[in-house]
Amino acid sequence: MQPYDERLTVPRSWWLLAVGAGFSLALILFPFGAPAMLAGLVGGVALAAMGISSYGSARIRVVAGSLVAGEARIPVGALGEATVLDPAETVAWRTHKANPRAFMLLRSYVPTALKIEITDPADPTPYVYLSTRSPERLAQALEALRAR
């Protein structure tokens, strides 16, 4: 079985936001002089880059009989049918079709997703929604693990 491991990194263009945040903070500190502006530029870029990096560090893995998505670890035995969502269905399931009790690891910049039913009767979570760039591969990895 091919292991599945995906990191939901942010688009490259988002790193320009960090630079923009640094320039904004530098402009805010303009009245306090050049050293304050430089500190604002460096500090603003660093803080924004840390935030962007943290947001883009979400991982989806299939390891040791479990689906690990962000902070959640779900045994494969508790997972039911996996449905690959195309871009239109992805938007629908994260908006008007979404169930508030569902576990959702979503990133709006990822155009496709996988919806996996939860079959554990003790778990009130109806399904898991995972933004993923390769939903077919993730579904295959889960199916291969379930077939073991």
Image (cartoon, helix red, strand yellow):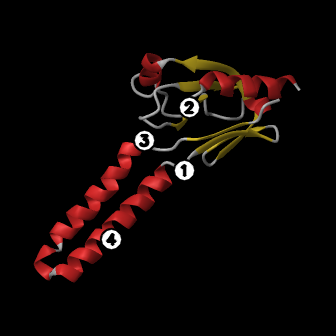
Amino acid type shown at disc 2: Thr
Distance between the Cα atoms at labels 2 and 3? 14 Å
Within-10-Å neighbours for mark 2: few <14, some 14–19, many 20+? many
Q: Secondary structure at mark 4?
A: helix
Within-10-Å neighbours for mark 4: few <14, some 14–19, many 20+? some
Given this view, does label 2 or label 3 mark the residue nearer the observer?
3
Q: Secondary structure at mark 3?
A: loop
Given this view, does label 4 or label 1 mark the residue nearer the observer?
4
Distance between the Cα atoms at labels 3 and 4? 22 Å
Residue in the picture at 42% in, 53% down: 52
| Residue bearing the label numbered 1 | 57
Distance between the Cα atoms at labels 3 and 1? 12 Å
Amino acid type shown at disc 3: Pro
Residue in the picture at 37% in, 51% down: 15
| Residue bearing the label numbered 2 | 132
Q: Quadrant of the N terminus?
A: top right
Q: Quadrant of the C terminus?
A: top right
Distance between the Cα atoms at labels 2 and 1? 13 Å
Earlier residue among tags 2 and 1: 1
| Residue bearing the label numbered 4 | 42
**Vertical placement of residue 144 versus 67, above or below:** above
Earlier residue among tags 4 and 2: 4
Earlier residue among tags 3 and 4: 3
The spot of residue 69 in percent (x, y) is 63, 41
| Residue bearing the label numbered 3 | 11
Q: Which mark identifies residue 16?
A: none
Earlier residue among tags 3 and 1: 3
- The answer to whether residue 57 shows anywhere in this view is yes
